Amino acid sequence: MKTTLSLIKADIGSLAGHHEVFEECKNVAKEMLQNAKNSGLIIDFYVTACGDDLQLLMSHQKGVDNPEIHELAWNVFKAAADVAKKFKLYGAGQDILKEAFSGNVKGLGPGVAEMEFEERPSEPVLFFMADKTEPGAWNYFLYKVFADPFNTAGLVIDPKMHDGFIFEILDLKEGKSVELRTPEEIYDLLALIGQPGRFVIRSVKRKDGLIAAVASTQRLSLIAGKYVGKDDPVCIVRAQHGLPAVGEVLEPFANPWLVAGWMRGSHHGPLMPCPVEKAKPSRFDGPPRVISLGFQICEGRLIGPADMFDDPAFDLARQKANEMADIMRMHGPFEPHRLGEEEMEYTTLPKVLEKLKDRFK
């Protein structure tokens, strides 16, 4: 039996600005997914939120990019957005960029990460959800987990991992992808993913083809042609038994790194790992947050979750993130806090340049 995991998210409106998902919106999602489970469309589900994004975790046997599953998610987001509009929540329906469903939510606003696999005797899976940042935020994380032996001891010790992994890299501007093999093409890989605004890791698989990780790659500004909020990406990572251990998957978050996003999607800030209950960014609408839920997959059922960052071992990372936030905030509207020119093209900056063009001599 092949199991498919679908993690689909959308900003459907939030409480007190870009802060948190309203409980009644989550309740609508739970009710609709429970009905889908009762009808046999999905095997299991879990509803949560990261900041202002409603997160739908679903297991089923329909495969990736299935129209029925995507339509289910679309209908849930539309219903939750209606609740948000009823209560005049902020940004109600923000990620619903088009009214008509066209068979797949990709390109319509929501972010999607899906993988299909044969379940192993034990199947631990970690779901990562971020707020106030973009898909390129996963580049550093996935590189450390699957290509850096200083992070992942299994790359040296585990015979099933020793040959390395294959990274699928998507060029967001050209819409093309390339597969790079590690460790032999590690420098080529870094040359690309070190530019996270353009090149993003879409998936990672073992050299024998075993799928290990998938990430969302949707860029809202590229879809809408203007700034409509940051992409708030999601990621699914399988662990153990010939793949990185759970602790190796979580280890990169012990030191926060700078990502694009934060206030108005236009600033660099530290990615702060936090438990689900703390994923309610407020300072300068941030700093960017990431949560992780761990499940065991059993015949498609989601056993769990465990809140992976609800651990004092990440307290120092959170302290560092706050210190980094202070350093970045003191720059105000200056780079490197504010994003570079290319990333600002969907904001008001082009209008400012247009207004002043005749005054340049």
Image (tube, grey):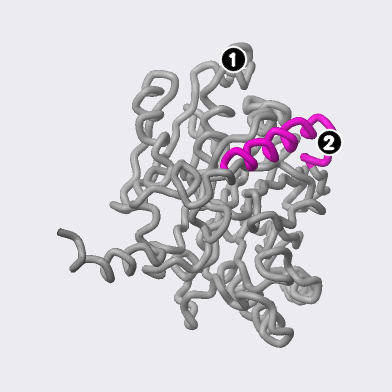
Decide: is 329 above or below 27.
above
> 160 or 291, which is in the foreground?
291
Dividing the picture into quadrants, the one containing residue 191 is: top left
Q: To which residue does mark 2 refer?
A: 311
Decide: is 213 above or below 76.
above
- What's the magenta region? 308-328
Disc 2 residue crowd, few under 14, some 14–19, many 20+, Cα 10 Å: few
Image coords of residue 285 (percent x, y): 64, 58
Single out the mark in the foreground, 1 or 2.
2
Image coords of residue 289 (percent x, y): 67, 48
Image coords of residue 158 (percent x, y): 62, 16
Q: Residue at x 61, y 41 (%)?
A: 270
Q: Secondary structure at mark 1?
A: loop
> 248 or 320, which is in the foreground?
320
Q: Secondary structure at mark 2?
A: loop
| Majority SS type along the magenta span | helix
Q: Residue at x 57, y 42 (%)?
A: 328
- Three-letter residue code for mark 1: Pro
- Three-letter residue code for mark 2: Asp
**Residue furthest left as drawn:** 361
Tell me, yes or no, whether the highlighted magenta stretch contains residue 205.
Answer: no
- Which numbered disc, 1 or 2, marks the residue that appears first in the sequence? 1
Disc 1 residue crowd, few under 14, some 14–19, many 20+, Cα 10 Å: few
Residue 159, disc? 1
